[in-house]
Image: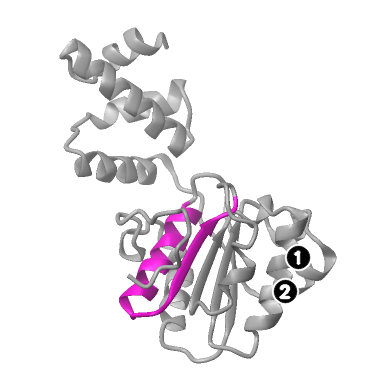
Amino acid sequence: MNQLGLPLSLNSKMLVSSFIGNKNQQVLDFVNQLLTQKGSAVVFISGAKSSGKTHLLQGCAFSALDQQLNVAYIDIKQELPEEAISDLEPVDWICIDNVDYLSITQQQALFDLYNRIKPTNTKLIVSASSLLGELNLLKDLKTRLSLAVAFTLETLNDEQKILIIERKMADINININSKVYHYLFKVFSRDLNDVLNVISVLDEASLQRKSNISISFVKQTLGI
C-alpha cells in the first residue's frame, strides 16, 4: 500500500462503503468526486463524539489507496514525531484526525503545509469535534481552514450505533442480543466507544465464566 510510514495503522473495516448515516451522503458523494478531480482541495469535517469522524477519514484513506495514490492518515491525539505534519507535502491524500488537539508547533506546521499544497493536486481532509469557529487555533491557520469545504456529520441514534456494534461483533464472531446494547445505552453510556470498550470487558468475563452475555450477566458483572 502507498501509505506514509507513520506509527499508525488503518482499520480495514473503516471503509467509506460501510459508513452509516443517511444525512452523511453529501460528504460521501463529495469525497468520491475528489478522487477523480485535479487540483488541491481542503475539507473540514466536524462532528460530535462517536459520529464517525475517524471512520470517515480512514475510509477516505482506503479509497485513495484503491486509486494507487500516496496516502497519509495521522491522528493528532496519538503520539507523533515532531516532523509528522511537515513531512506530508509529497503525499497525494492527507487525512488529519482531531485537529482540535494540535499543539502550537503542529498548528504552524499545518499552516505551512496548507500553503505548500495549494498549487498541487494534494487533497487535505481534517476533522475536529467542533465547528471551526469554536476551535482555539492560530488565527492564520483558522483563516486558511475557513476556506475549506465544511461538513458536519450526523449524530447517530441508538439503532445506528447498535448496527455498528453488531458489525464489529460479527467480525470477531460474538453474538449478543440487541437488548443488551439498549440496556447499556440506558444505564451505562450512550457513547459508542464506551460501549465497545465495556463489551470487551464483558466478553472476557463471559469466557472465564462460560456464560452468555445477557442483561442479567451485565448486571452481575458491572453492578449496574
Q: Quadrant of residue 180?
A: top left
Residue bearing the label numbered 1:
108
Question: Residue flagged by tag 2: what amino acid is it?
Answer: Asp
Left or right of residue 167: residue 135:
right
The quarter of the picture where residue 173 lies is top left
Residue at x 41% of width, y 8% of height: 223
Amino acid at circle 1: Gln
> Decide: marks 1, 2 in contact (CB < 8 A)?
yes
Q: Residues within 10 Å of mark 2 (few under 14, many from 20)?
A: some
Q: Between residue 166 and residue 14, name the one nearer to us.
A: 14
Q: Which residues are magenta?
A: 52-76
For label 2, the SS is helix
How far from the left and from the top, in percent, is residue 188?
Answer: 46, 22
Could you tell whether 207 is left or right of 215 in the image?
A: left
* Magenta-colored stretch includes residue 66: yes
Dot 1 alpha-carbon crowd within 10 angstroms: few under 14, some 14 to 19, many 20 or more:
some
